[in-house]
Amino acid sequence: MYMKKYDTDGQKIVAVCDKNIIGKKFKEGVLVLKLDESFYKGEEVCEEEVREALSCATIANLAGEKSIACAVACGCVDPDTVIFIEGIPHAQMVQI
């Protein structure tokens, strides 16, 4: 997985994407999932590093089976909120 972190306006944003889909674009109906390397491609990380980053994040964008499974396993994403675009799982997380 690739993970990139952003600190902006007091928010800790984490973007996580599976390696096999980075840089690709998926479309289904009006939904478009564009996995730009400029946004998602940071460090190559393991599941533990993703869990740690998500525990501190206020906002997260996640795409791909492995990334979503990791976020669901650590309780950061409810599996019922995951959407699929051309079969690719995508979720967003916001801590309020």
Image (cartoon, helix red, strand yellow):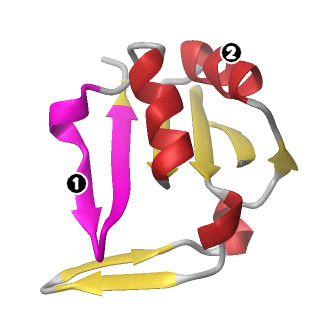
Which residue is under mark 1? 83
- Magenta region: which residues? 78-93
Residue 36, position as x, y percentages in the image? 62, 75
Residue 17, position as x, y percentages in the image? 60, 54
Residue 16, position as x, y percentages in the image? 61, 47
- Residue 20 magenta: no
**Residue at 39% of width from left, 25% of height from top?**
72
Residue furthest out toward the right: 43
**Residue at 76% of width from left, 23% of height from top?**
49
| Above-or-below relation of 78 to 4 | above
Which residue is under mark 2? 52
In front: 70, or 31?
70
Position of residue 8 in the picture relative to residue 66 (left or right): right
Q: Residues within 10 Å of mark 2 (few under 14, many from 20)?
A: few
Q: Could one spot residue 9 in this view of the protein?
A: no
- Residue 84 magenta: yes
Position of residue 88 in the picture relative to residue 61 (left or right): left
Q: What is the spatial separation of the Cα atoms under label 1 and label 2, in whole angstroms? A: 23 Å
